[in-house]
Image (tube, rainbow, N blue to C red):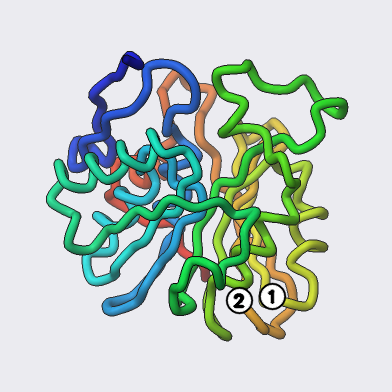
Amino acid sequence: MDEMTDDTVLDGRVKLRQPARGYRAGVDAALLAAACDAGPGERVIEAGCGAGGALLAAATRRAGASFVGIERDPKAAALARENAAVNGLSDRVAVIDGDVVHRFAGLGLEPFDAALANPPFFDDPTALRGPAEARRAAWMADDGLSAWTGFLTKAVREGGSITLIHRADRLADILALLGDKAGSCQVRPVHSFADEPAKRVLVRAIKTGKAPLKLLPALVLHGRDGGKHTEEAEAILRGRAALAWD
């Protein structure tokens, strides 16, 4: 049986059981959850929810919304359902076995108000040093980033939002792949330190949106003063603040 760890996120508000090895929910999942701005009564889908790190944190932050996670790994999907139950969220959080390489229509679900994703960071093993084998399923997009953006744009209604976090060097690809299916894009760079280039970007787009691209102020995770996180990042990671899109 796979070794598991019992962790907490959102300053202990969410219990998360996850594999000790392989992909584990971390800062990226926390930022994705913080970027979810679903309102009361809205429906949100997360593609590739894993054990539920971002899914459950987003559901906890947005108590009036309902959530569905899609996960291709049956073990991870079962673990996400277990985590939802442990956190008392089964009434608002469902997890479905599925893969983004298949058509959204095949899931038999109505389009959502919002979609979230933390797509695998690699889709070309020859371009960069790929992930360790234990993390390959979560870090290597076998059908490319286009499969993820295609799924997300199909998963939301017209006017619905698409929010994802990815490597900063893939920003141009992300914007190009969203293409004419989604617009009104907003980009928030995420820097490890203020004097270093951004390593991540949070991107939010609106299906059929027409507003011009907006580059928002960067989020800096760490300072040079020896503290673990900046004050802003600490507030976001602990759930005391959200990542606003204005």
Q: In this figure, which residue is indicated by the disc labeled 1?
A: 182
107 left or right, relative to 78: right
Given contact means CB atoms under 8 Å apart, are the residues at marks 2 and 1 in contact? yes
Q: Which residue appears at 82% of the width and 54% of the height?
A: 172
Q: In terms of depth relative to the viewer, which is nearer, 202 or 48? A: 48
Helix, strand or loop at label 1? It is strand
208 left or right, relative to 192: right
Q: Residues within 10 Å of mark 1 (few under 14, many from 20)?
A: many
Give the spatial CA distance, label 2 vs label 1. Answer: 5 Å
Q: In this figure, which residue is indicated by the disc labeled 2?
A: 206
Q: Which residue appears at 76% of the width and 51% of the height?
A: 171
| Amino acid at dot 2 | Ile
Helix, strand or loop at label 2? It is strand
Q: Position of residue 4 (x, y in %)?
A: 30, 19
Q: Position of residue 141 (x, y in %)?
A: 68, 40
Q: Position of residue 17 (x, y in %)?
A: 27, 29
Q: Is residue 156 above or below residue 199?
A: below
